Image (tube, helix red, strand yellow):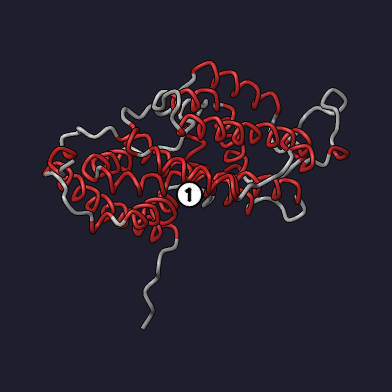
Amino acid sequence: MSITNRAFGQVDLLEELAPDVERLYNRHLEAPREWFPHEAVDWGTGQNFADKPWSAEDYPLAAGVRSAIYVNLLTEDNLPYYTNTLLSHSRAGHPLLDWNHQWTMEENRHAMVMRDWVHISRCIDPVLLEEGRRVQMKTGEVPRPETLADLITYVAFQERATQVAHRNTATKLPKDDTMGRRILGLIAGDETKHYLFYRDLAKAAFAIDPSAMMIAATKQAVNFAMPGTGIPSFTRHAVRIAREGIYGLGQFMGDVLEPVTGWWDLEHLAGLSAEAEHAREELVKMKVTLTEQVERLAQRLNPVRPALA
């Protein structure tokens, strides 16, 4: 099939990606991360909320870190809707369907083990958490990429961003909370493997239909938002999380956008349509703008005082 035809979207990307999905799925299975939620939890340290109501003093924590735990957990709770979105882009008999089931099975334990730790450690108000869960899951708000190319590029960004958020949250926990650090580390490890699958699947898709993938990558990068926008007071929590240095514009630029697009080697893509070439230029301009914004933000937070004569 010619590059010209591919540029006009006449490629069945799902069908042509089948061998790559199978290859990457097998790679994932050949390096299993076996861990059990019940073994990661120190059950003997819990206290009955009926006997001792929750108080913020039970687990002193910066507001941004508490917001990160709250948002990350409620995001994991929304798994059924993410799975539904993934399944809408696969079909029976395709290896992507098998991967989606595997992904769901592994992701499902994240909310379980996080909630056990949260309740035992008392780092989050359990009433606030349950009320947030009800709103989040009743709304069912999740990103809904239009095409398979959109889905692959978005999830590559999203899995990387989620891994970074969990990892950075763990570093902000008190040193003596070894349970919380271990649990967030286990979750971040799963997210890393999921990121590698989608990152490399997107790389394979760029070789098949570079124009469609370039357009999708730019669209998803420009419009990217962490999952969880349906969470109550999400914007307020997001600001706190960014101020704490857990996840914000700087992390998106330095830990997500640059390494992911760098791996795809977008600068050297050949055979792009005019629309795809325009999308590549737009992405380059976006990176320049974001870099300037991150630098200005850093200067505001750490102003350099001129030396006195």
Q: Is residue 294 above or below residue 22?
A: below
The residue at 45%/23% (across/down) is 92
Describe residue 309's horizontal placement relative to residue 170 as left or right: left
The residue at 38%/61% (across/down) is 299
Secondary element under disc 1, as helix, strand or loop, is helix
Q: Residue 136 is drawn in which quadrant? A: top right
The image position of residue 145, as x and y in percent, is 35, 30
In this rendered view, identify the residue nearer to me: 284 or 121.
284
The image position of residue 127, as x and y in percent, is 69, 23
Q: Is residue 165 above or below residue 291?
A: above
In this rendered view, identify the residue nearer to me: 233 or 214.
214
The image position of residue 16, as x and y in percent, is 32, 38
The residue at 62%/40% (across/down) is 66
- Numbered disc total: 1
Point out the residue furthest to the top here: 138
Crowd tier of the residue under label 1, counting other residues whose Cα lies within 10 Å: few below 14, some 14–19, many 20 or above: some
The residue tagged 1 is: 196
The residue at 21%/43% (across/down) is 211
Q: Is residue 79 above or below residue 21?
A: above
Describe residue 269's horizontal placement relative to residue 93 as left or right: left
Point out the residue furthest to the bottom here: 309
Question: Which corner quadrant holds the C terminus?
Answer: bottom left
Describe residue 226's horizontal placement relative to residue 76 as left or right: left
Question: Which corner quadrant holds the N terminus?
Answer: top left
The kind of residue on which mark 1 rests is Leu
Q: Is residue 150 above or below residue 271?
A: above
The image position of residue 245, as x and y in percent, is 51, 52
